[in-house]
Image: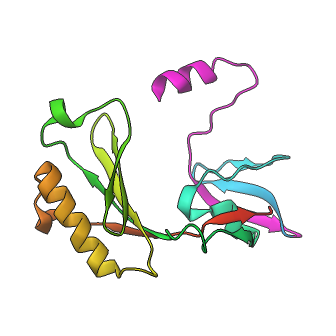
């Protein structure tokens, strides 16, 4: 990430704004500007929403799902957790890897200081409690994490295409 940042910011037409969105000004169902937590206001011709599940920009302009894939792609929920390394030499890989579970799939992303992992599943086919139990069991058996020490963040998301 640091290398990409370093190489990208060498370009004369790139400005790095290391901040978070504090407010989104909307006018006529279009983004007028972004107010950042460092006090800067960003005015642009084009905004690309890279806020993941939060969809901050898309939701600010009430962007509706134009095409839903929920009838074919059943996943709509994830439980995510950040884990410390137990055995860094075995757990730190240079790839993201996944495992299938009974009700969905687990992603595992080794980072420099921790592991980002989560369980993607369909809330129409299993309960959050059952998914949580299954995910805890997986993390305990696969890696040795203590089930009682795991705290998850729940993410609900739509699947489909937004027109805007």
Q: List x then y, in percent, for residue 120.
A: 41, 63
Is 7 included in the stretch rendered in magenta? yes
Q: Nearer the viewer, residue 148 or 56?
A: 148
Pick the residue in front: 69 or 63: 69
Q: Can you see residue 150?
A: no
Residue segment shown in magenta = 1-28
The residue at the point 17 percent across, 33 percent down is 90
Residue 111's quadrant in the figure? top left
- Please tell me whether residue 74 is drawn above or below residue 43 in the rendered image: below
- Measured as percent of width and height from the top left, residue 156 is found at 49, 72
Q: How many marks?
A: 0
Q: Is residue 103 above or below residue 18?
A: below
Q: Is residue 32 magenta?
A: no
Tell whether 156 sits left or right of 23: left
| Residue 159, image quadrant | bottom right
Q: Is residue 103 left or right of residue 28?
A: left
State the image coordinates of residue 54 (x, y, percent, origin top left): 56, 63
Where is residue 15? Give x, y as percent.
68, 31
Q: Nearer the viewer, residue 164 or 59?
A: 164
Which scheme is used to colour this image of the protein? Answer: rainbow
Q: Residue at x 28, y 80 (%)?
A: 129
Does residue 20 appear in this view? yes
| Left or right: where 111 falls relative to 157 | left
* Quadrant showing the C terminus: bottom right
Residue at coordinates 19% horizontally, 57% vertically from top-left? Answer: 139
């Amino acid at each position: 990430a640091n290398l990409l940042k370093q190489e990208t910011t060498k370009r004369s037409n790139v400005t790095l704004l290391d901040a978070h969105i504090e407010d989104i000004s909307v006018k006529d169902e279009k983004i007028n500007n972004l107010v950042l937590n460092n006090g800067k206001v960003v005015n642009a011709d084009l905004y690309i929403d890279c806020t993941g599940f939060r969809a901050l920009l898309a939701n600010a302009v009430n962007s509706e799902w134009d095409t839903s894939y929920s009838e074919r792609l059943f996943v709509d929920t994830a439980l995510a957790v950040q884990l410390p390394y137990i055995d860094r030499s075995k757990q730190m890989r240079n790839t993201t890897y996944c495992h299938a579970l009974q009700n969905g799939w687990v992603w595992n992303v080794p980072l420099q200081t921790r592991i980002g992992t989560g369980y993607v599943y369909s809330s129409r086919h299993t309960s959050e409690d059952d998914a949580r139990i299954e995910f805890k069991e997986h993390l305990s058996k696969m890696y040795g994490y203590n089930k009682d020490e795991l705290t998850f963040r729940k993410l609900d998301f739509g699947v489909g295409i937004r027109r805007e």
